[in-house]
Amino acid sequence: MSEYHVKTAIIAKTVIASLGLLALFSPSRASAQLVPQPWVSVGGQDGDVTYAVGARALNLGVEVGSGPDGSAGVDVLKFLSLPVISPYVGLGYYSEDKGVAVSGGVQVGATDHLFVGAGYNSVRGFNGQLGIRF
């Protein structure tokens, strides 16, 4: 592994850890959802189908996904909880030399117990989401 890749990996891990801590200690509404809200996601990038599963609690989320060329990775997400719609941004890291990924999207309550979403991840591409609220 070249010196450039090692430095990039260290920087990426530092950024991910910093954002995770920032999101963890940022203020959250008292009425935030305590029970995790899981979802599945299917999308596409460069002609490949991509998959992910995620969960959200206290306006923070984690999504584990598979991308093109057999890559796999984890994204940490921060949600802005509004009455019906919840936009989010995220940062992740993927294997197979895909590196750091940025993501963003929105989840919308469809019924009392279902939500749908759409998002973009720089490694996994555009995706659709379907999730459950307990």
Image (cartoon, rainbow, N blue to C red):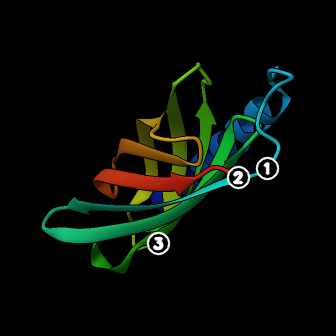
Quick check: 124 left or right of 2? left
Q: Gap in Å between the C-alphas at discs 3 and 1? A: 26 Å
Is 67 situated above or below 86? below
Question: What residue would you read off at disc 2?
Answer: 134
Question: What residue would you read off at disc 3?
Answer: 72
Residue 2, position in %: x, y?
46, 66
Circle nearer the N terminus (3, 1):
1
Quick check: 112 left or right of 2? right
Between 10 and 107, the one lying in front of the other is 107
| Labels 2 and 1 touching (C-beta < 8 A) | yes
Q: Amino acid at mark 1?
A: Val
Q: Amino acid at mark 2?
A: Phe
Q: Nearer the viewer, mark 3 or mark 1?
A: 1
Q: Amino acid at mark 3?
A: Ala
Q: Residue at x 20, y 71 (%)?
A: 48
Circle nearer the N terminus (2, 1):
1
